[in-house]
Amino acid sequence: MIRNLTLLLFTLLSINTFAQNNHKHVKLLEEIKGKRYELFIENTDSISYDVFLKVDSNDFRRSSERPILETIPGNSKKRVLTMVKLNGTEGKYTYILVVNEVSYALKVDKDYEIIDFKLDKALNSKSVILFTKDDCAICPDAKHILAKNKISYTEYNLDKDTTNYNRIIKEFETIKPKSNFNNIPILKIEDKLYNNIKSLDDFIKALREGLN
């Protein structure tokens, strides 16, 4: 598994190395105490990220010469490398940081052809309701994403649940007056309502915002 991940990440390096070094949520930090350099990876997002870190330098003795593969939980900072500056050197180093939203690989689900992603378990305590219809094209994939990430949810199919349809719409109108609720799926997380989901990207974005 690790060997396969390393090969995958080296492939990614050739595609997008420089952009990854400037990730929006995941950054490399250093704390310097004399000759001792502690390197940390900080994740300011609410979800976990898998990271690949490769440090190059002739100015340090390092706790590890190998590339570093770590999962950084949401809203956390993790020490990943200790380096000791050698006498007579400037203390310079370069690094490559590759960040993935996925657990252990960019894995495409063969059944649904969607990119899997991971949410922290602590976020799963929130109330999640998904409103679907039989002719909703992305609803099966949306449910698959919820199930794959072990997010508990309640589903209401508006084609089958005609008894409660009007009640549901009235509840929506209380949250979002004069809104159009014909666009399915509709996602409700706690008191937040998302009724403009037109793609799986929109669905994942709404999930991340609602569970944040």
Image (cartoon, grey):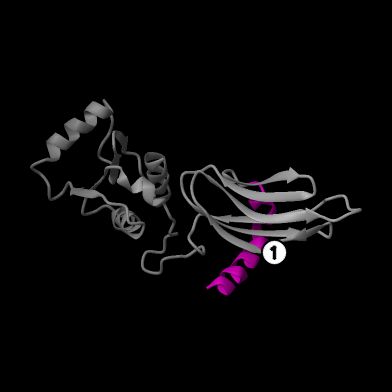
Horizontal relation, residue 96 to residue 209: left or right: right
At label 1, the amino acid type is Ser
- At which x and y percent is residue 141? 33, 57
> Is residue 174 toward the left or the right of residue 67 in the image?
left
Q: Residue at x 56, y 59 (%)?
A: 70
In this rendering, the answer to whether 78 lies above or below 194 is below
Drawn side of residue 160 relative to residue 83, left or right: left
Disc 1, SS: loop
Q: Is residue 165 magenta?
A: no
Q: Is residue 151 left or right of residue 18?
A: left
**Residue 14 sits inside the magenta stretch:** yes
Quarter that holds the C terminus: top left
> Residue reaching furthest left?
163
Q: The magenta stretch spans which residues?
A: 1-22
Viewer-proximal residue among 178 and 35: 35
Q: Residues within 10 Å of mark 1 (few under 14, many from 20)?
A: few
Which residue does the numbered mark 1 point to in the structure image?
64
- Residue closer to the observer: 131 or 98: 98
Q: Position of residue 111 (x, y in %)?
A: 36, 68
Task: Examine the rendered structure and indicate whether residue 195 appears above or below residue 70.
Answer: above
**Residue drawn at x 69%, y 50% as measured from the top left:** 38
